[in-house]
Image (cartoon, helix red, strand yellow):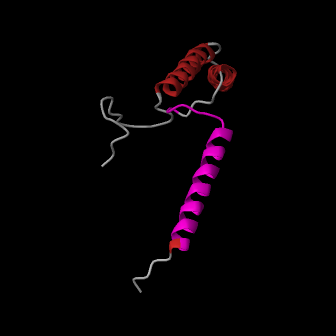
Amino acid sequence: MSHQDPDGDKRLANIERRIFEMQERQNQGEKKRDDRGLPAGVGAIMGRVATELVAGIIVGAFIGWMLDNWLGTSPFLLVLLFFLGAMAGMLNVWRMFSGRGLAVGYFDEHSDSSSKE
């Protein structure tokens, strides 16, 4: 069966063209994100930064307050965990902007992520 159908080739080309056009429309309709996965728009980025910082501070202070009440060491652990929570929030913001996300462990600074073998 070496017979090739010229109408079949035209239909195949038409289908491929239509698929390509649909993919282009879908890509234009989606919100754009950069390579690090950050949301588009300054408002979204600032909202995430504020959430990371406030959440770290509140969680740290709450855990410190609870431990102080339990151990009777007021206000030592509250102050200590307040600052640790603030540092954790800043670390999360740095990881977000540097593109590391929630990666744990060794991170090669000089590797090209687009050339995977």
Among all residues in the image, which is located at the extreme bottom?
A: 1
Residue 34 % position (x, y) = 54, 31
Closer-to-camera residue (59/110): 110
Q: Residue at x 60, y 13 (%)?
A: 79
Q: Residue at x 36, y 34 (%)?
A: 107
Q: How many marks?
A: 0
Above or below residue 2? Residue 117 is above
Look at the image and say whether residue 25 sits in the magenta stretch: yes
Closer-to-camera residue (67/35): 35
Residue 46 % position (x, y) = 65, 19
Closer-to-camera residue (39/108): 39
Residue 108 in which image quadrant:
top left
Look at the image and say whether residue 61 sits in the magenta stretch: no
Closer-to-camera residue (67/111): 111
Above or below residue 56? Residue 5 is below
Above or below residue 78? Residue 101 is below
* Magenta-drawn stretch, dominant element (helix, strand or loop): helix
The residue segment tinted magenta is 7-36
Residue 28 % position (x, y) = 64, 39
